[in-house]
Amino acid sequence: MKLQTRQIMVTVVAIAGFLSLGGCLGNPKKQTKPINHIASSSTKEDKEAIKQKQLAYLKEHEQEMTAYVKAHNANITQVSYDWDSIKTVVGGNGTPQGGDEILLVYGYANGSDLTNFSLNFTLDENKMPKIDSIGSDSLYRVEKK
């Protein structure tokens, strides 16, 4: 009986060893996100042109942005934007490859540099912000003046 139990244990350990070895040596999937070069170019002039289009778009939708800010914090009565602060970054979604590109714009509430906030937008395939994707994680820090 002991011999049969020992043979079973050796077989189970051998199978587990082969399975784990196969998992380690198998070809892992590539974990990087493919870079999309539809609208972007490596030239500085093209990047600046895209940034100017993004700025014009945001200025056209300034009222919607302000309504969003005021709706998320009742203490905010006045909003101004730092249009020179616009930048595109890769969002961090907790994975090694990161998330999609997002556009950030910073602003100030209630006329004070101490009450700053940021708004973020996802970008479409032409690198333009989507106004319906507006978000922020810093509007709740603004206190009453």
Image (cartoon, helix red, strand yellow):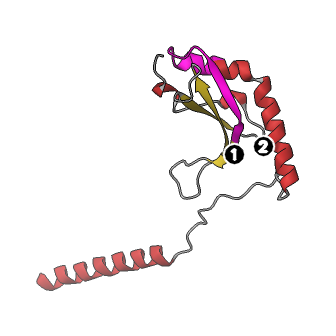
Is residue 78 in sight in this rendering? yes
Nearer-N-terminus badge (1/2)? 1
Which residue is nearer to you in this view: 124 or 73? 73
Q: How many numbered dots are placed on residues in this image?
A: 2
Q: Position of residue 129 (x, y in %)?
A: 74, 35
Considering every residue shown, the one lying at the far left of the view is 1
Task: Tell me the residue that label 2 is attached to.
Answer: 127
Mark 1 vs mark 2: give the one in front.
1
* 88 vs 124, nearest the viewer: 88
**Mark number, residue 88:** 1
Task: Specify whether 125 is left or right of 72.
Answer: right
Where residue 130 sits, quadrant-wise, is: top right
Q: Nearer the viewer, residue 88 or 115?
A: 115
25 or 53, which lies in front? Answer: 53
Q: Amino acid at mark 1?
A: Thr
What is the C-alpha distance between the residues marked 1 and 2? 9 Å
